[in-house]
Amino acid sequence: MKEQVEASLEKIRPALQADGGDVVLIDVEDDGTVKVKLTGACGGCPMATVTLKHGIERLLKKDIPGVKEVLSV
């Protein structure tokens, strides 16, 4: 599933990079929890939670049925 998550993150990465940020995949756990780290401008952005839950998590759940939750670490 880790390869699928990486491929899915590539879809959203250009939008994050356009705003001076990025996302790094940290881990994919067996229970469907995906751990990511928002970097650059996204790391300290007040809207980071919205980006994480309504952008990244929504995309990953749509693309990969096994994803249950996305957490920022």
Image (cartoon, rainbow, N blue to C red):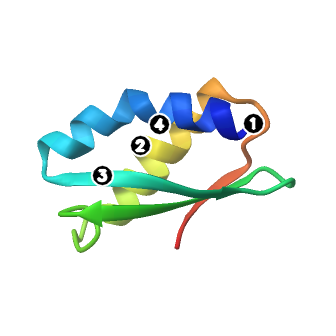
Q: Please tell me how crowded label 3 is: few (under 14), some (14-19), or many (20+) other residues with Cα within 10 Å.
A: many
Residue under numbered circle 3: 22
Q: Whole-percent x and y of residue 29?
A: 78, 57
- The alpha-carbon separation of the residues under discs 3 and 2 comes to 13 Å
Q: Position of residue 51 (x, y in %)?
A: 35, 52
Residue under pointer 4: 9
With respect to residue 22, does 6 lie above or below? above
Q: Earlier in the sequence, mark 1 or mark 4?
A: 1
Question: Residue at label 2?
Answer: 55
Q: Residue furthest left?
A: 19
Q: Earlier in the sequence, mark 3 or mark 1?
A: 1
Labels 1 and 2: the sequence-earlier one: 1
Q: Residues within 10 Å of mark 4 (few under 14, many from 20)?
A: many
Q: Amino acid at mark 3?
A: Asp
Name the residue nearer the viewer: 72 or 46: 72
First along the sequence among labels 3 and 2: 3
Tell me where residue 52 appears, x and y as whole percent.
Answer: 43, 55
**Secondary element at image label 2:** helix
